[in-house]
Image (cartoon, rainbow, N blue to C red):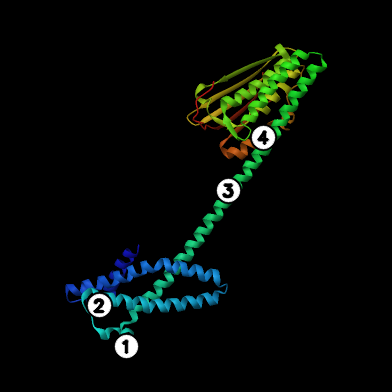
């Protein structure tokens, strides 16, 4: 960068000259003089950056810092020009002992020498701007990190709400079997619940899991409920094989499956179906659907029924995890049955499927 500055200074010198050099050697001297100036400032730039930072750290007074900068600028103005002119003397063989006296050094300085004074302030200002930009970048990065930590904490809290909720439902189902005196089914349900809890503990720290694991969770939970409802509950899972390794939020289907059983199957006298499907939509979207046959006895599902831990928690988790890139839709008043649909970005886990 300083080499480019040296070229610009050389061109500026040509523009400001009233008489052009009368020999090729004069042109060479002009270019070498300006390149020496630029390269000398290239060597000084790191030291100037350090000087500005030290003055900023040690002196709170802006006036004092400004005075010290003026002193440093004047010092470097003289020093840079002396070193540059001595280097020219050495380069071109103009070596005379009298050139190094006080009078000769003072004579070396001219009006054009003051460009080094301005260069000093340009370098200091550039370092100040760099510090401002770095501070802004670091502040933005810290804010993003805090936001990410907050979102993760909120997702973890929401997931912790879901886990005890379905556990209570499962224990209630088991207690119903015990009250009915069906200890064999109660033992079977406890074994299925233990299997489900072991799976959850194995992946307890993960905010996202593979879709096939999430379907396993849902299937295991429905197996617990099937012990209670027997033939009254019919389950159906249908997932595209090419999306089984997609990452989804842990237990994202659980509240929807619970609602399907609670507000659909539990309200029926005849057998009812809970169907879970997973489809790849286009190249980069995943759609999950949970459908259940409608309740009987003239009772229709009400949106308010599902705005507790069910759809409300699911919506909150999706909003925090995916923002506007997700969709959550549901139709609770259709006489053919209740359908909840989730569409979110397809994120592949890259692991072999255990379908």
Question: Which quadrant of the structure image shows residue 205?
Answer: top right
Q: Going from the N terminus, do you reach mark 2 or mark 4 first? A: 2
First in residue order: circle 4 vs circle 1: 1
Question: Which callout, 2 or 1, points at the residue further toward the start of the chain?
Answer: 2
**Residue highlighted by disc 4:** 159
Q: Mark 3 points at which residue?
A: 145
Please provide percent x and percent y for residue 182. 79, 13
Tell me what residue is drawn at x 70 percent, y 19 percent.
191
Q: Residue 226 carries which label?
A: none
Badge count: 4
Outermost residue toward the bottom?
103
Q: Mark 2 points at which residue?
A: 89
Q: In which quarter of the image is residue 24?
A: bottom left
Q: Name the residue under label 1.
A: 103
**How far apart are the alpha carbons under marks 2 and 1?**
16 Å
For mark 1, give the secondary structure.
helix
Disc 2 packing (10 Å; few <14; some 14–19; many ≥20): some
Marks 3 & 2, CB-CB < 8 Å contact: no
Q: In the image, is 193 to the left or to the right of 149?
A: right
Res. 55 visible in picture: yes
Res. 334 visible in picture: no
Expressed as whole percent of the image width and height from the top left, the position of residue 130 reads: 47, 62
- Image coords of residue 1 (percent x, y): 35, 62
């Amino acid at each position: 960068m300083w080499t480019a500055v040296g070229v610009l200074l050389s061109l500026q010198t040509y523009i400001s000259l009233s008489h052009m050099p009368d020999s090729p050697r004069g042109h060479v001297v002009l270019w070498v003089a300006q390149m020496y100036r630029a390269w000398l400032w290239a060597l000084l730039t790191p030291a100037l950056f350090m000087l500005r930072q030290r003055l900023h750290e040690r002196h709170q007074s802006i006036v004092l810092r400004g005075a010290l900068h003026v002193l440093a600028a004047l010092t470097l103005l003289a020093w840079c020009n002396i070193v540059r002119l001595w280097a020219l003397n050495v380069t071109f063989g103009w070596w005379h002992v009298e050139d190094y006296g006080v009078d000769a050094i003072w004579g070396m300085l001219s009006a054009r020498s003051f460009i080094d004074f301005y260069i000093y302030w340009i370098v200091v200002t550039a370092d100040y701007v760099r510090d401002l930009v770095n501070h802004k970048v670091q502040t933005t990065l810290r804010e993003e990190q805090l936001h990410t930590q907050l979102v993760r904490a909120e997702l973890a809290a929401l997931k912790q709400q879901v886990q005890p909720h379905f556990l209570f439902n499962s224990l209630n189902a088991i207690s119903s079997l015990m009250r009915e005196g069906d200890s064999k089914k109660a033992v079977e349900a406890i074994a299925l619940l233990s299997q489900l809890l072991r799976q959850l503990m194995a992946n307890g720290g993960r905010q996202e899991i593979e879709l096939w694991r999430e379907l396993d969770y849902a299937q295991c939970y429905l197996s617990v409920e099937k012990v209670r409802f027997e033939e009254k509950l019919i389950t159906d899972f249908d997932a595209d094989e090419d999306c089984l390794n997609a990452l989804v939020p842990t237990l994202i289907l659980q509240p929807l499956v619970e609602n399907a059983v609670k507000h659909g199957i539990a309200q029926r006298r005849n057998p009812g179906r809970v169907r879970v499907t997973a489809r790849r939509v286009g190249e980069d979207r995943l759609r999950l659907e949970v459908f259940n046959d409608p309740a009987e006895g003239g009772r229709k599902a009400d949106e308010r029924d599902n705005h507790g831990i069910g759809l409300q928690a699911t919506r909150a988790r999706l909003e925090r995890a995916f923002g506007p890139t997700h969709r959550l839709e549901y139709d609770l008043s259709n006489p053919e049955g209740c359908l909840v649909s989730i569409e979110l970005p397809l994120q592949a886990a890259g692991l072999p499927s255990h379908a």
